[in-house]
Amino acid sequence: MELFIGFDIGGTNLKLGLFDEKLKLLDKDNVANPAGLTAEWLVEHAFQSANTMLTRNGYKLSDLKAAGVGCPGTIDMKNGIIIASPNLPFKQTPLRQMLSTKLGCPCIVENDANAAAWGEYAAGAAKDINDMVFLTLGTGIGGGIISDGMMVRGHSGQAGELGHMIVYPKGRRRCNCGQYGCAEVYASASHTANRANDRLKQGVPQTTLNDVYREKGQVTSKDVFDHAKKGDPFATEIVDGTAEALGLLCINITHFTEPQCVILAGGMIAAGDYLLKKIKEQFKKYVWTMQEQTLDVRFATLGEDAGIYGAGDLAIRQKEQS
Amino acid sequence: MELFIGFDIGGTNLKLGLFDEKLKLLDKDNVANPAGLTAEWLVEHAFQSANTMLTRNGYKLSDLKAAGVGCPGTIDMKNGIIIASPNLPFKQTPLRQMLSTKLGCPCIVENDANAAAWGEYAAGAAKDINDMVFLTLGTGIGGGIISDGMMVRGHSGQAGELGHMIVYPKGRRRCNCGQYGCAEVYASASHTANRANDRLKQGVPQTTLNDVYREKGQVTSKDVFDHAKKGDPFATEIVDGTAEALGLLCINITHFTEPQCVILAGGMIAAGDYLLKKIKEQFKKYVWTMQEQTLDVRFATLGEDAGIYGAGDLAIRQKEQS
């Protein structure tokens, strides 16, 4: 049996999974990052975590054939360098080489959203599908594009910023990125809550969300979906706004790389089939009519493990690289 | 020397080019399609045109190593079947096999917009560039996407319908496809003229385009650009509308596959640097500000020959297939 490790580096935690050559998950872990994080510290941390995991499964470091890493930020894939990362101490950091030296095996470094997309493609909701687009609906909207079994990375590794596609150019909501009308600023979990809170603050006469707002000082996207499902008109209006932006985003995705399916991940998918149905309604409302167009939109199935699966699979596929 | 032919099948004409193995164009032709076109007729027509071209260059059919074909419509690439084509008598037509049998060499069939994109990638404006998006600004807006040197075809060959990306979801202009707010219905050459004509019909008090409109009954996109360049405020407003839709489209393209450059082709590029400057201005107006984002947008250089170059290059690359 050949062994591979997939790392998923986050701002606060490091996740890792141990895989065999068929991407069977043998063990996994989720460890808090050390304080005063530096790039060297993080590599040491990954090394020790991997060592611990290997040891407790009866293996040693030299059994490792390759490792994959999902990491937030802009990545020079060719050279395995993290050019910049929003929440991590990486700047022009040769992470692939550092980790490869430490672990004594070939490593591959990938953007975290791409790694998660690849995980769903390799072992999750898009298994057996060659063309897919992955969207995470969380604080923002992240994306990953796989076309004919190939990760679309873009000229400088910044493809798949699908949350920043402008769906409402005349929209008044401004995104943190500086643009107006980004899909993210209407349809991410945080911004769904924001849109509700902005209106509740102004005073919406009749909505069951007022009680929650008064009690907690704000509502969450889960509150919005819960109340919409119970038929509250205001909550439904907010959800319809989210679904419209996602439906439009899916139309543009369809006309762009024409994936077989769109996979949704992130906290908001807890809203379940209600959300899927709403998105499909909005898709159908706006999409062209020359031919029957249906949207195959599904929920991710790997949850928090998508990143380690993706990184693990990339390690398996690229074990010959170093 | 090895010989290859690239065909570009259109609704009224068949273009073909004879290439060597380094994609050097040896000869080209543009012949009218025969009347009462059937799929068999078109294959016979292509065969005879190829034969004529080979003969006049001192070669014979058996010297041909492979042929490529750009063809409008939806194509099953795996099986070389034209599923449907808007202006040609193809329906579930096994064009690759028919042409391959007739010419006695392997053939490859590709969507015409993709073939043109591939031509610019292989021998034109995007030579030496691996990530590009191609837009033709004509009656409609066609597109082709190349990512990391790979043609993005989509799940069923319908990727790159970039003219139907919705840029104004609340827009009142309806596209022929049935959608409202498509990029095409604002920014194609025909629709640039349409937007001007609609307003001129209603009566625009002060514009130098009124004379043209009265004389010819309508204005063309060329008229609009010509008058805008001379400073006419109404013509400038129409051009700005075109540039805004293209700028927004380019922003969404940037966030999607992040190409190194966007290549513009089609009749409207005759407007020259004035058009490029306007698009860049609009791109800059709407794009995010977290990092310096500039748009490398260029004009196609192969003109009408892009399709035969693309088909020829695909033939060279895939000569082993049949």
Image (cartoon, coloured by chain):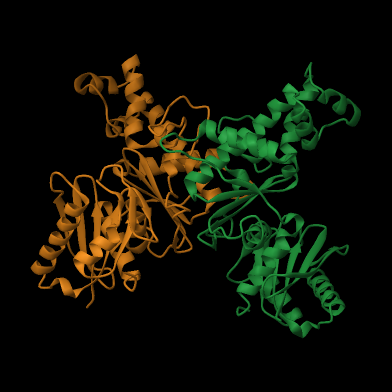
Chain colours: A green, B orange
Q: In which quarter of the image is residue B179?
A: top left
Q: Name the spot of residue B68 as percent of width and height, x first.
A: 28, 62
The residue located at (40%, 61%) in the rendering is B78
Q: Decide if residue B274 is on the left or right side of residue A154.
A: left
Position of the C terminus of chain A, as image quadrant, is bottom right
The reply to whether residue B289 is visible in this rendering is no
Q: Decide if residue B66 is on the left or right side of residue B181.
A: left
> Please, which residue is most extreme toward the bottom here?
A62
Of the pair A262 and B199, the residue shown nearer to us: A262
Q: Name the spot of residue A3 as percent of width and height, x first.
A: 72, 78
Of the pair B89 and B9, the residue shown nearer to us: B89
Q: Quadrant of residue A173?
A: top right
> Please, which residue is most extreme toward the right here?
A215
The reply to whether residue B127 is visible in this rendering is yes
Q: Name the spot of residue A235 as percent of width and height, x first.
A: 74, 27
For residue B200, above or below residue A275: above
Q: Decide if residue B128 is on the left or right side of residue B316.
A: right
For residue A175, above or below residue A211: below
Q: Decide if residue A141 is on the left or right side of residue A47.
A: left
For residue B263, above or below residue B186: below
The residue located at (74%, 25%) in the rendering is A231
Q: Name the spot of residue A60 as percent of width and height, x first.
A: 81, 83
Position of the N terminus of chain A, as image quadrant, is bottom right
Q: Count up the numbered dots.
A: 0
The residue located at (27%, 48%) in the rendering is B90
